Amino acid sequence: NKCKKVEEPGGEIGFVTAIMNDSQYFRHHVKWYSSLMAKKTSLTVILQRLQTLDGVWGNRGQVRIVEFRQGNREDNIDDSERNKTYNPRSRWGVAWTYERA
């Protein structure tokens, strides 16, 4: 039984945009919406789109961003090994709500 990758039209931007569109409809039923993105360029686009959602940006709602890193801690690696072993992988989480702070 093989696991198949599900692809959303528009990639991760399309996927998060669909969640954003749904969030407007369900805004009174769900407090926080969130997604994890592999590309920082996707985060930039999503933040721009979140600015257009009525009730999220500004003094009404809230947006939170976090960067997740995977890899060796930089302070535990000497200079000779740094380029060989230190290869952090970053992902970005974004969350939004229509609730006031």
Image (cartoon, rainbow, N blue to C red):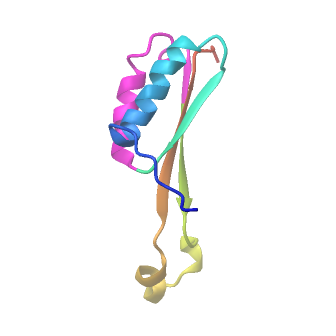
Q: Does residue 91 sit above or below 48 in this rendering?
A: below
Residue 5 or residue 75, whichever sits in front? 5
Q: Does residue 15 sit above or below 56 in this rendering?
A: below
- Total numbered circles: 0
Residue 69 or residue 25, whichever sits in front? 25
Q: Position of residue 73 (x, y in %)?
A: 58, 71
Residue at horizontal 45%, vertical 10%?
54
Residue at horizontal 47%, vertical 86%?
81
Numbered range of the magenta stretch: 39-63
- Whether the magenta-drawn stretch holds residue 54 is answered as yes
| Left or right, residue 9 beside residue 26 | left
From where the camera sits, is residue 53 visible? yes
Q: Quadrant of the C terminus?
A: top right
Give the farthest residue toward the front. Answer: 1
- Whether the magenta-drawn stretch holds residue 42 is answered as yes
From where the camera sits, is residue 59 visible? no
Residue at horizontal 37%, vertical 25%?
49
Q: Position of residue 18 (x, y in %)?
A: 44, 27
Q: Position of residue 1 (x, y in %)?
A: 58, 62
Q: Position of residue 71 (x, y in %)?
A: 55, 69
